Image (tube, grey):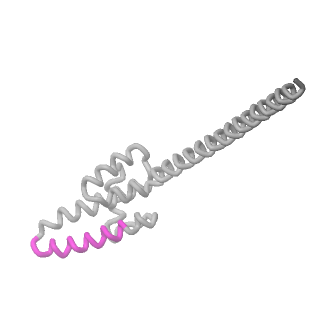
Amino acid sequence: MADNQNLGDDLNDMLDDTQKNTTDFTDSTQRKADAFSEDAKRAANSFENDVNAASKDGKNIALIAHLTLIGWVIALVMNNNTKSEFGSFYIRQVLGLGLCGLVLSFIPVLGWIVSLGILVLWIMSLIGATSGEKKLTPVLGEYFQDWFKSL
């Protein structure tokens, strides 16, 4: 009977140890899950801040404005939400270049040469937008900013 008692005590001790280990494991897992959850929240907030900063500085808007007429319209709509000065600057520049190219393309022979010049100015504008600098289009850039200041 003493052997049965010792066996019962051993089983109770093993059960207690198993319950303690299970509780410790559960607590440890819960702490790790909480830490992971906090890390995930911080990462999500950081990502959201990065996205907001990217759209606020207007660089994306400026780049989209350089992509055909449809891109320019999309950039204009996007800029109406955030009103970034950088985005507005390049929306005005690209609008001016596009209108100059359109008007001057109707001049026979000279229109082709001028259109190539407009293309070079457009590429210079795109490089400026990509580098994050406000670079006025040579000769007409200041006029574009003045004429289209409502954008």
Q: Residue furthest left?
A: 108
Examine the structure image and report whether residue 120 is included in the region drawn in magenta: yes
Front in this rendered view, residue 45 or 139: 45
Image x and y of residue 34, in percent = 65, 39
Magenta residues (range) = 108-126
User: Residue at point 32% right, 54% down?
Assistant: 148
Quarter of the view holding residue 95: bottom left
Front in this rendered view, residue 88 or 30: 30
Examine the structure image and report whether residue 11 is included in the region drawn in magenta: no
Left or right: residue 136 versus residue 5 is left
Q: Residue furthest top?
A: 1
Image x and y of residue 118, in percent = 25, 70
Instruction: Name the magenta segment's main secondary structure.
Output: helix
Image x and y of residue 143, in percent = 33, 62
Q: Residue furthest front?
A: 1
Image x and y of residue 141, in percent = 35, 65
Quarter of the view holding residue 25: top right
User: Residue at point 9% right, 72% down?
Assistant: 108
- The quadrant of the rendering that contains the N terminus is top right
